[in-house]
């Protein structure tokens, strides 16, 4: 009886590890030499109608590219932005494109470059997913399902709590 329970526990652990691997695999996409990983959207606060998406982009050797557009059917627009400090005040500025150079990840994160969602049709709630398309100058367009993380619990790529917008 003890061996049967042990075998059952081992089988259960193997299945759970496999499911965790599938979940990890779904969070990674690639197109034309660009790998897209760790994408997440911030839950929206109140009725602001805005939020942001963060993601890590990696170009394979010799395949640099530029992220030139983003879109979501859940938002009126998805704009490429960066955050800058000007006279001690954090401000957002639009970007025409975001460079993705080979050899080093391009990290879109709180306080830096990001995708600003404007005119959301409804609140983004933790646990939901957001349909998002990313368009690259050379690689083309890739469709993603981006998980929505909570305001206080969302972690940036560096493992620090993300600031609110």
Image (spheres, rainbow, N blue to C red):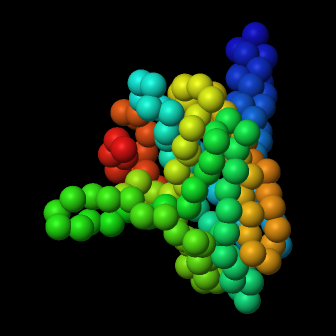
Residue 50 vertical placement versus 159 (above, below): above
**Total residue callouts:** 0
Residue at x-position 62% and y-position 29%: 121
Residue 42 in sight here: no
- Nearest to the observer: residue 120 or residue 59: 120
Residue 83 vertical placement versus 164 (above, below): below
**How far across and down, in percent of the image, does residue 80 sit?**
55, 61
Q: Image quarter for residue 101? A: bottom right
For the C terminus, the quadrant is top left
Residue at x-position 75% and y-position 75%: 137
- Nearest to the observer: residue 26 or residue 144: 144
Q: Image quarter for residue 164? A: top left
**How far across and down, in percent of the image, does residue 36 sit?**
68, 60
For the N terminus, the quadrant is top right
Residue 117 in sight here: yes
Furthest residue to the bottom? 62
**How far across and down, in percent of the image, does residue 109 sit?**
46, 57
**How far across and down, in percent of the image, does residue 117 sit?**
56, 45
| Image position of 1 (left or right of 103) | right
Q: Image quarter for residue 70? A: bottom right
- Nearest to the observer: residue 144 or residue 81: 81
| Image position of 28 (left or right of 90) | right
Furthest residue to the top? 1
Residue at x-position 77% and y-position 20%: 8
Residue 50 vertical placement versus 95 (above, below): above
| Image position of 15 (left or right of 111) | right
């Amino acid at each position: 009886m003890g061996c049967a329970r042990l075998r059952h526990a081992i089988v259960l652990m193997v299945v759970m590890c496999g499911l965790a691997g599938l979940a990890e695999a779904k969070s990674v996409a690639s197109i034309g030499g660009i790998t897209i990983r760790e994408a997440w959207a911030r839950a929206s606060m109140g009725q602001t109608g805005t939020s942001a998406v963060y993601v890590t982009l990696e170009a394979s050797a010799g395949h640099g590219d530029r992220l030139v557009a983003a879109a979501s059917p859940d938002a009126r627009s998805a704009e490429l932005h960066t955050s800058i400090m000007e006279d001690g005040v954090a401000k957002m500025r639009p970007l025409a494109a975001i460079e993705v150079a080979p050899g080093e990840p391009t990290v879109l994160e709180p306080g830096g470059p990001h995708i600003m969602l404007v005119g959301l049709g409804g609140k983004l709630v933790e646990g939901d997913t957001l349909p998002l398309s990313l368009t690259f100058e050379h690689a083309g367009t890739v469709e993603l399902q981006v998980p929505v993380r909570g305001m206080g619990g969302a972690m940036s790529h560096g493992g620090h709590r993300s600031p609110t917008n």
